[in-house]
Amino acid sequence: MPQSVRIAPSILSADFARLGEEVRAIDAAGADYIHIDVMDGHFVPNLTIGSNVVKAIRPHSAKVFDVHLMISPADPYLEGFAKAGADIITIHPESGPHVHKSLQTIRALGKKAGIALNPATPVDTLDHLMDLVDLILVMTVNPGFGGQSYIPLEDKIRAVRARIQATGRAIDLEVDGGINPQTALSAMAAGADVLVAGTAVFTGGADRYADNIRALRGPMLLNEGLSQS
């Protein structure tokens, strides 16, 4: 069975001029993970933050720092993000020549290891990696920008869920891209247990964050009720 669903607000949609305050606000509003999108302007067409920013915001929350590296190559930066305070480090199989070794490195640094699948990355990429991953991220947009529309990849989410169940391990199945209260239900019904949401959480300012997170949990409660009926 999937684990209980967690909400991971993406600080890509936060006010970067007040980033520490924004992290404290989403923590207080009920975030389970803090999702940190790292982009290099090379692997994806955008440029965001580096390990020094992660280090700077680490004291502002004790929640899990879920760091998604959309960079290539990723290997030279794994230790830096680990030292900066990442709890989970997720990489793409396309971001280096030896993804198996990269995942081993993340675990050797004492962190949980994640693998991200872009919309066109096949599920069988996970072959021979399942024993090394603690999180599998299914991208329901093409990475690089916030605010995109959800790509309905429920068949892919279900296929990943089946692989996780076959291991008997508690591996997070995270979905990122176009998540709102409507698409959240579809993703959860297919097997997601971590939802990344940027625009849907940060819209309206800090006074709205708790309500926005509750709105994402609303479909979760409905989904759990349906599964128990």
Image (cartoon, rainbow, N blue to C red):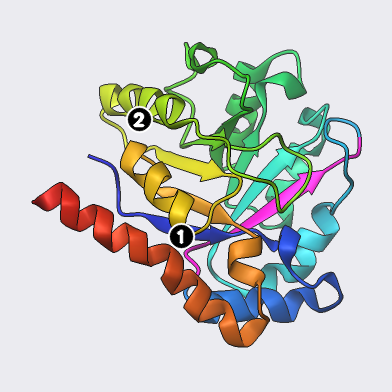
Which image quadrant for residue 111? top right
**Range of magenta residues:** 31-41
Q: Residue furthest bottom?
A: 207
Q: Which residue is at 58% across, 26% downward?
A: 104
* Tag 2 residue: 161
Q: Residue furthest left?
A: 229
Q: Which residue is at 49% across, 11% downward?
A: 124
Which image quadrant for residue 168? top left
Whether residue 39 appears in magenta in the rendering, the answer is yes
Q: Residue 3 vs residue 147: left or right?
A: left
Q: Is residue 91 above or below residue 210?
A: above
Disc 2 crowd rating (10 Å Cα; few below 14, some 14-19, many 20+) is many
Disc 1 crowd rating (10 Å Cα; few below 14, some 14-19, many 20+) is some
Q: Is residue 29 visible?
A: no
Q: Residue 57 vs residue 63: left or right?
A: right
Pair 1/2: label in front: 1
Q: Is residue 177 above or below residue 202?
A: above
From the top left corner, tell me how far across and down residue 40 is, in percent. 88, 40
Most foreground residue, 33 or 144: 144
Disc 1 to disc 2, how far (Cα)? 21 Å
Q: Which residue is at 78% across, 31% downward?
A: 74
Residue type, mark 1 in image = Pro
Residue type, mark 2 in image = Arg
**How many numbered tags mark residues here?**
2
From the top left corner, tell me how far across and down residue 137 is, in percent. 54, 36
Q: Quadrant of the N terminus?
A: top left
Most foreground residue, 181 or 110: 181
The kind of secondary structure the magenta stretch mainly shows is: strand
* Tag 1 residue: 181
Which numbered disc flags the more N-terminal residue, 1 or 2? 2
Disc 1 on helix, strand or loop?
helix
Most foreground residue, 175 or 101: 175
